[in-house]
Image (cartoon, rainbow, N blue to C red):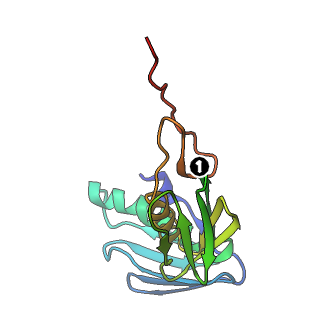
Amino acid sequence: MSRIGKRVIRVPDGVTVMIEGSHVKIKGPKGEIEREFHPALEIVHENGELRVKRPSDRRDHRALHGLTGSLLTNMVKGVTEGFLKKLEIVGVGYRAEAAGKALRFHLGYSHPITYDPPEGVTLGVESPTLVTVSGVDNEKVGQAAAEIRAFRPPEPYKGKGIRYHGEQVRRKAGKTAI
């Protein structure tokens, strides 16, 4: 049996859960998330806990059991704590600046790149070389951070580009003269 699917998800005070068939809506202090789950699985909310029950021991039901448990855990964590990703910009002249809700990146191209965040994601600039991506939906926060990183991924020779905070970039040796 899936150990992740079996896990009980505690719903803290101040968080409301509404379940209508396979549609789940969770509201908390940071915001609200709703998601449609596979109709074969049953999601039960009782005594301040969420449980996921599967109909059989088939391979696809076992896989969906663990997935549903993880998604529900992330939904509850998102509306209570929120999710945050930090991105570092490395390179001479590489920087980011706020432009309303959007960010404008100067990454060595002939033009600046403007990035508008998806709904529910907040972008911030702590310093010209440190960008924060935050929100209640872990999936949207991760996708937005990946899209920003894709503008200029870190290259292996000098390490220039956009990387996640704390990411180790594998470096290569340059050419050697004979």
Look at the image and tell me whether residue 131 can be seen: yes
Q: Is residue 178 above or below residue 48?
A: above
Q: Residue, x 49% and y 69% (percent of image)?
A: 112
Q: Residue, x 46% and y 60% (percent of image)?
A: 146
Q: Is residue 161 above or below residue 13?
A: above
Q: Is residue 93 above or below residue 11?
A: above
Q: Position of residue 24 (x, y in %)?
A: 46, 82
Q: Position of residue 87 (x, y in %)?
A: 60, 58
Task: In this rendered view, identify the residue nearer to me: 111 or 42.
Answer: 111
Q: Quadrant of the C terminus?
A: top left
Q: Residue, x 51% and y 34% (percent of image)?
A: 170
Q: Position of residue 21 (x, y in %)?
A: 38, 85
The amino acid marked with disc number 1 is Gly
Query: In this figure, which residue is indicated by the disc labeled 1?
Result: 91
Q: Position of residue 173 (x, y in %)?
A: 49, 25
Q: Residue, x 59% and y 67% (percent of image)?
A: 9
Q: Is residue 48 above or below residue 146?
A: below
Task: In this rendered view, identify the residue nearer to me: 135 or 11.
Answer: 135
